[in-house]
Image: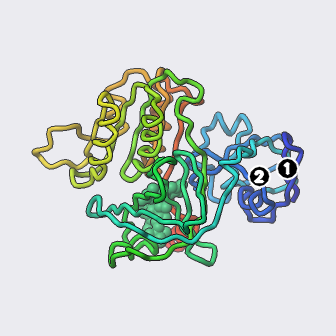
Amino acid sequence: MRVSLVKSERSFSAAEGQSLLEAAAAAGLRIAQGCRGGSCGACGARLLRGEIEYPHGPPLGLSAEDRAAGRILLCQARARSDLEIEVDELRRPEEVIVKRLPCRIERVQRLAHDVLALYLKLPSAETFAFRPGQYLDVILGEGRRRSFSIASAPHDGALIELHVRRVEGGEFTAPLFAADPHKRLLTIEGPLGRSYEAGAKTPQAPLLCVAGGTGYAPINAILRDLLERGRRRDLHLYFGARTRADLYAEAHVHALRLLDPTLAYVPVLSEPSPDWAGRRGLVHEAVLADHERLDRFDVYVCGPPGLIEAARRTFAARGADPSRIFFDSFDYAPDALARQRSSASTRD
Ligand SMILES: Cc1cc2nc3c(=O)[nH]c(=O)nc-3n(C[C@H](O)[C@H](O)[C@H](O)COP(=O)(O)OP(=O)(O)OC[C@H]3O[C@@H](n4cnc5c(N)ncnc54)[C@H](O)[C@@H]3O)c2cc1C
């Protein structure tokens, strides 16, 4: 099937069962992408002609209104006929230079019982330009890859910082905790995903950042970049975790507050011990309890799909401007998702 892009007048072919995002990438086209699980909405496009299908059901990242307006998500959509679509291709040089590079885990820091900071060192002759909010993939072979947001700011220097949470039984993350990964060699590909130009359109607007667990990683990069470039805005950071021991980024937040003592930091625990005097409940509920209206904010929400789904549902109803709200969903890797779906369908 042929897929034509109306803006650039380019086209590519898509095989049956292949996602439009994979088909576009195979043809060398660069299109914004995020979670690749249908949650974040980064690979959105408009279908002008033809028919698509979603083998896994309508993606969470599209509302009924989006679908009625012809909006589709390329990571989930499969072509059922020739198509005409409208989508923005990435052109800016810092977004298009995606490299596959070897690197070494130069430093490891345990940030919590189930979170490690990995500091990656690239070969000395290589450069790795990225923008805050972008991520990289660790390549495992046979088409399998694992995504991690970059927690350091672009100007931070030679090492790339990642915050990696252990997934029980996870092929990549579990072994990192079982044996010290210091000096281990990895292959990475990146930078990937959209960058977040905080305040690009609304430099004076307050910025509301909402993190679930290691969803803090790209927020750290964004806030450091903003503060170290002297861009002063009203900053609000909500960090959701289960227990006090899961508030892994206290030292990072402290470093940010040295740059901007007015940064408002609200840790929210969903399973606190009785002596916790701070906020309790789910992190998006704390935001809603504190802010009757969200119209004035630029909003960045990052973390597990459940948080993204809850924030998407509730923040718009409080007036958050859809063009100024940005979701970054930490979905499962495509092969893990496929395994999970196939074991769920065997159980049904
Ligand atoms: C764009 C993007 C950026 C991300 N950035 C980060 C980051 O900065 N830090 C971070 O810690 N994670 C991040 N993630 C999530 C991370 O990619 C996964 O946790 C990782 O792929 C797990 O790899 P694994 O090989 O250990 O587990 P797998 O072998 O892939 O999975 C093992 C089993 O665990 C379950 N599983 C898989 N992933 C998850 C998950 N995320 N949560 C709960 N259960 C899961 C599945 O049932 C799966 O069958 C990001 C994801 C995306 C899409």
Is 190 placed above or below 229 here?
Answer: below
Q: Which residue is more in the foreground, 12 or 38?
A: 12
Drawn side of residue 47 relative to residue 213, left or right: right
Task: Give the number of the mark in front: 1 or 2.
Answer: 1
Q: Count the numbered circles shown.
A: 2
Q: Which residue is mark 1?
A: 83
Circles 1 and 2: CB atoms closer than 8 Å? yes
Residue found at x 47% / y 29% = 231
Residue 342 visible at all: no
Q: Of the residues shown, which amino acid type is indicated by label 1?
A: Leu
Q: Residue at x 42, y 35 (%)?
A: 227
**Distance from label 1 to label 2 (Cα)?**
8 Å
Amino acid at the residue labelled 2? Ile
Residue at image coords 44%, 37%: 228
Query: Can you give x and y, in whole percent of width and height, for residue 184 in the image?
Result: 44, 76
Residue 178 in percent (x, y) is at: 33, 77
Q: Which residue is mark 2?
A: 52
Look at the image and tell me in which quarter the N terminus lies: bottom right
Image: 341 above or below 32: below
Q: Classify mark 2: helix, strand or loop.
A: strand
Which residue occupies the foreground of this view, 212 or 91? 91
- 247 relative to 261, above or below: below
Q: Residues within 10 Å of mark 2 (few under 14, many from 20)?
A: some
**Left or right side of 347 for 47:** right
Q: Is residue 253 visible?
A: yes
